[in-house]
Image: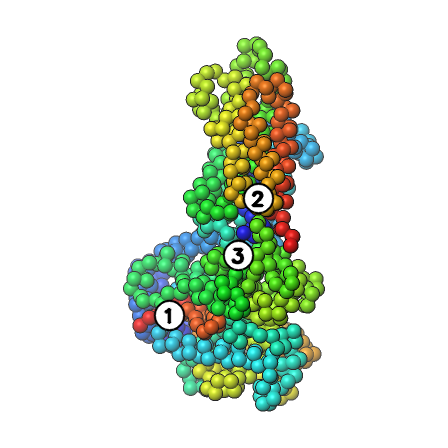
Amino acid sequence: MQNFDEMYAELPAGQSPSGGVQLQFQGQSQGGQRQFQAQGVRPHYKGYAQWLARQSGETMRARRDEAEMIFRRVGITFAVYGAKDENGAGTERLIPFDLIPRIIPAAEWAALERGLVQRVTALNRFLHDVYHEQEIIQAGIIPAQQILGNVQFRKEMMGVYTPHRVYSHIAGVDIVRACNAKGEGEYFVLEDNLRVPSGVSYMLEDRKMMMRLFPDLFSSYRVAPVMHYPDLLLETLRASAQPGAPDPTVVVLTPGMYNSAYFEHAFLAQQMGVELVEGQDLFVKDRYVYMRTTRGPRRVDVIYRRVDDDFLDPSVFRSTSTLGCDGLVDAYRAGNVTICNAIGAGVADDKSIYPYVPQMIEFYLGEKPILSNVPTFACRNPDDLKYVLGNLKDLVVKEVHGAGGYGMLVGPASTQQEIEDFRKALQANPGGYIAQPTLSLSSCPTFVESGIAPRHIDLRPFVLSGKDVQMVPGGLTRVALKEGSLVVNSSQGGGTKDTWILEV
Amino acid sequence: MLSRTADHLFWMSRYTERAENTARMLDVNYQTSLLPQSAAVAQVGWQGLLSISELVPDYTAKHGEITPGSVMEFMVKDQGNASSIVSCLKAARENARAVRGSLTTEAWETQNQTWLEVNRMLGAGEFERDPGQFFEWVKFRSHLSRGVTAGTMLMDEALHFMRLGTFLERADNTARLVDVKFHAVQSDFFGAASEKDQEYDFYHWSAILRSVSGFEIYRKVYRDVIKPERVADLLILRADMPRSLHASLNEVVSNLAMVANDQSAETQRRAGKLRADLQYGHIDEILANGLHAFLTQFLDRVNELGGRISRDFLVPVRS
């Protein structure tokens, strides 16, 4: 299996992320001049590689410690589910930040951006169709059962008007670069996150950190700016208000400070200058939503919710939820408030719907998909299931409704026992799983304990859909810090990197 | 602004102020305990400190006998004691974290840094190594917290609710300090006393003054020897003494006026009346009618104001 690296055209033999050999500073143990083995550097990394070669190990370590100290002070932490310790401080962890940026050339990004706009546009068209005419079912492209029987399908959304026909206002599309059939590096879509994708605050904080730690790099590299994301987000949210709200009041709805992404909720609310509300701050009266303020009730027009569908309205969904607001769905259906992302958007990012996205693009837009899917086996098909069961050790198997790197099997990295356990789960409920070949995600040099070594990465750009579809040039690069690991999720020991889109 | 946000900001400031005042009192007691004095007097000091916060029963249940080391540990490091410095700093930080988006970056980072740092210091045994320096540090973090909010926050409701919290808490804490410290002197402190007593009194009163950064102020204002009635005058009635009851109530009244809503008129009236009592009060009258009675009533009224502020602004207004 060929491995692509972002910085190097070819990794020296034995230095792939899973090969166990570190790229090192030469003379690391003997002293003498430190020099990075820089043969075969891809053109857009040339300047950076030269710069890196001039940095000493101590300097880099000092910068890393500085970054950690700043992240702690700023409180850029996330809570780990189930983790607890006595004083409560230990439940707040830092997501490791890596000093070495992931750099993408302008031309590659331009193609990626076109592909993302196309894909998200089609997905929103699909969602509108699902909750209105259902033409894609009538056309026989996706079986009705796949959509209507999906737990993410919300019948409450049938016929509900959404401004600009947008359902997923904020989409986080997970992209990996891997080897295609022609043996070239290509961007693939691994997953569409259309409900409440998180991570954008790390994209912004990582950039801020890099500019603080290495200002000289930014004067020699023309890196496209990303810091206007909150502006675009606010524009998108305001544009998504119902026509009857000319100067809409936008709020961010958070489950509260113990949620793992709380920092991001607070950060985005602050950056947009809108209120950060919890369910208890909202109430519905006469099918309008209000928040409780020190000066009495105030109308709310757009809710950027970071709470899952199930918890949004105890009168419609989970009745025990205290995170939502009674009557919210009713107000929504009456067209008196906009919920972003729309309720029921999850039916389009389900892993069982994912294989149909290329067909959706052709069906709704009449275009060829610009970005490819990863080949996927749907285990509900007997043929696919048979193949999957016979090749578990080579495949990645995922729960259809799973997220966050939980409930998945990475065949090549698993023990025989883990594979057998998973086999039983799979046989018991084939429809609950899909499988994909183990993609060798591209790697990027990463600062680890023993020096600099290649580690696998992915990319999550954030696509905003309101009146228009737009995005900032960049995204969140996640890196699997464990040697050989392909799992980049922060809950599974992943870190982040700044992502540079070059302007020229 | 959201009622819940206002509530968190109000309590964030109260806890910060409470941590500072606890540090001030501990510091004074600690400094005083370095002077030659009888064991009984020292005991009274530590006991008084616990009674200020109404903590004698809790303390006794946990530690039994009152010893300086145990009292300091109980009031500084004990997370089981909601009034300890570490508990107050934690509560302040948790409240800040719940509304970090409503604070400026600097204001939030100050709160967060204080919490991270206090954990580090206590973990590294820095408090035991030099209690005086630790108390200084707590005071300065509180100064910093107030300075950062005043210097960076938009002068809107958020800032007013924070200042309401600060000064309501300060009025409460100073009143408790005066009450307990005047009680601590068993003898008739306003009458004639032996020379030995007078010497003791000097250290007693100057310690109280120092605990509210008032020693130099006293000298400047009265240009005379330290007399108990003047200490009381300074801490209760002087509007220009930043930690006095009068000064604190002035801030409470003006910040209340800034956030007034449809239902807060009665609360404003009561705050104004309490302030007027201080503004037009005279120390001789107060002493004649009994200082303890005056302060007890004052604390009740401050407590009631706190309850009314919660009802008027912080508990969500029902539709």
Quarter of the figure that contains the C terminus of chain A = bottom left
Q: Amino acid at mark 2?
A: Trp
Q: Nearer the viewer, residue A402 or A317?
A: A317
- How far apart, in angstroms, are the residues tagged by discs 1 and 3? 32 Å
- The amino acid sitting under disc 1 is Ile
- Report which residue position mark 1 lands on: A501
Closer to the chain start, of discs 1 and 3, is 3
Mark 3 belongs to chain: A
Residue B150 is situated, as x and y percent measured from the top left of the image, at 45, 42
Question: B41 and A410: which one is in front?
Answer: B41
- Which residue is depicted at the point 57% across and 81% down? A129
Residue that badge 2 annotates: B11
Badge number at residue B243:
none
Residue B118 seen from this side = no
SS at circle 3: strand
Number of the label disc, if any, that sits on residue A275: 3
- Measured from the top left, where is residue B233 in percent x and y? 53, 22
Instruction: Mark 3: give few (<14), some (14-19) or many (20+) Cα within 10 Å.
Output: many
Residue shown at 57%/44% (left/top)?
B11
Relative depth, front residue between A478 and A306: A306
Give the mark toward the camera: 2 or 1. Answer: 2
Res A214 seen here: yes
Rendered position, A358 above or below A446 = below
- Is there a contact, CB below 8 Å, between mark 1 and mark 3? no
Q: Pointer 2 indicates a residue of which chain?
A: B
